[in-house]
Every structure is written in C-alpha cells, then in structure tokens.
Image (tube, helix red, strand yellow):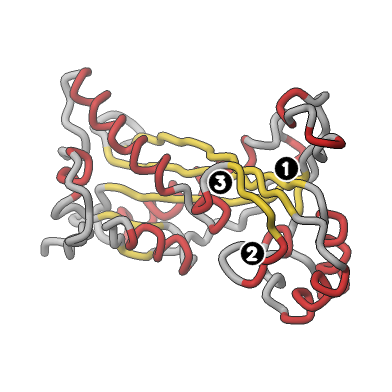
Amino acid sequence: MAPPDSVLGNALLMPSIKKLKGKRVVLASASPQRKEILSRFGLAPEISPSTFEEDLDPHSFEDIHEYPVATAQHKGVEVYERLVADDPDNPPDLVIAADTVVLTHAAPSPGGQVHVSLLPPMTQELLEKPTDKEDNLRMLLDLNGGICEVVTGVVFVYPILTAPGYEIKSLDERTLVHFADNPPALVKAYVDSGEGLGKAGGFGVQGNGGLLVSKVDGDFNNVVGFPASSFFRYLELLVEENEQDGGDFLSI
C-alpha cells in the first residue's frame, strides 16, 4: 500500500520536495512544534516518536554542540530500524530526527562594544528543564539581561544498498536568544503561569516567554524546536550530492 503523500499543497516544489512525493517520510518526534513547523512549509510526515532513552552523557563530548546531534542520531536510527523490523515490505524512505538543547552563553559586553564571537572561550552549561517553579525562577533570573544559545541537531536517515542498509546525515543549527533586562515581577509572573515548566531553559519563546526576549540572533524556528530553513536547504544539498555521484536520492 502506498504511503499517504507527505507533501502538502503549500510546499515549494524544489527538486528535493518532488523526490518526497509518494515516499514514506517519518518524523521521529511527538513534538507538536516540530510537526507544525514542517507543516507550515509543506511537509506532513508520519509521526513515530523514538523510544531512545536520551541518556547520553553531555560531559563525554569535547564539543557540547555535538551532544544534540548524537542524541538525534540515536533517535533516528532507533525509529528507522524499528519500522523496518515491523514492516519489511514498507520501510521508511526518510526518517527525520531532532534534538534541541539550551546552553549558557557569554554575556554581552558593556555598551555592546565587543561582539560575543570575539569574547574569550567559555565552558557552556546545559540548561535542562526546570524541576519546579522555584528552579524555573532561578534559571530565568540567571538568564535575565543575558544570552543563551539554542542548538538543534537534525538527522536524516534513509536507505542505501550497502551495510548497514541506511545512511545518516546530520546538521546542527545554533541560535542566540538575548533576554531583556526584565523586572523581577515580570519574570515571576511568567514562572507562575507554568508555561516554562517542561521546556529546556525554562521558557517558550513562541508563547508568553517571548515577552522576556529582546532579540533572537538566528533562526527563530530553531528556538521553537526545528530549524526549517537549514533542514530544507540541506535536503536540497543531499539531492545535488547524490546526482553528482551518479545516484538518485531516495530511489530505493
């Protein structure tokens, strides 16, 4: 049975999108934000959340930015292998996996005279989901008037003829979120709303958390949970690379 068409009518018909027509495209995530972002740009993949425990040790990575990419790889491979085992006659043509983390970042210099990229290297700390409202308040007061970095690892898993039977490609997108110097009453009111609970970094920029933010330096969608622009550009690049090598992306 042919899979439902994952390409919606609002999609821009680039060569890569045409390749996806009639293909089984799977999103290894239950995130409503990721689903909504992809749908907004014309892609409606099948939803199959990963069962990977997400138990990698972030301290085992020399570069913390590799951590979400590695987690996304485990998610994508788990879903791909499970779906192939469940229905060998109907394997996925493309599995998309993602993992988003929030990191501390260098604070802006007084008067903004020095760009953050020119500041001395710093050890970035991973900002997990707050354990409760008290932890959420502590986290946001620490970020108040400062900067955090949102990093999303995105992974593409698709079938090939050679072992292990699939290829893995990945990217990471990095976005800086600048917090305004908010009055404590505003921060506390946001925490009391409960919106930040269950969110890495303790805020949701697409909701009332946007009131705490003065500027987003980079892809706004990445802060919400999925860097659509980089995803679609890289998908197009995969088609071009396969054609240059004499192959046909997603042809098997």
Residue drawn at x 48%, y 59% as measured from the top left: 50
Are circles 1 and 3 on residues that touch, CB within 8 Å?
Answer: no
Mark 1 against mark 3, which lies toward the viewer?
Answer: 3
Most foreground residue, 41 or 131? 41
Label 1, label 2: how many angstroms apart (C-alpha)? 28 Å
- Residue at point 73%, 46% (across, down): 103
Q: Is residue 203 left or right of residue 146?
A: left
Check disc 3 and report its element: helix, strand or loop.
Answer: strand
Residue named by callout 1: 58
Foreground disc of the pair 1, 2: 2
Label number found at residue 210: 2
Which mark sits nearer the N-terminus, 1 or 2?
1
Q: Nearer the viewer, mark 3 or mark 2?
A: 2
Q: Is residue 219 left or right of residue 130?
A: left
Q: How many marks?
A: 3
Point out residue 185 in the picture as x, y percentages from the top left corner.
86, 74
Tell me which amino acid carries mark 2.
Answer: Gly
Q: Quadrant of residue 156?
A: top left
Task: Provide the residue designation for mark 3.
Answer: 152
N-terminal-most mark, 3 or 2: 3
Instruction: Report if residue 169 is visible in the image.
Output: yes
Above/below status of 9 relative to 239: below
Of the residues shown, which amino acid type is indicated by label 3?
A: Thr
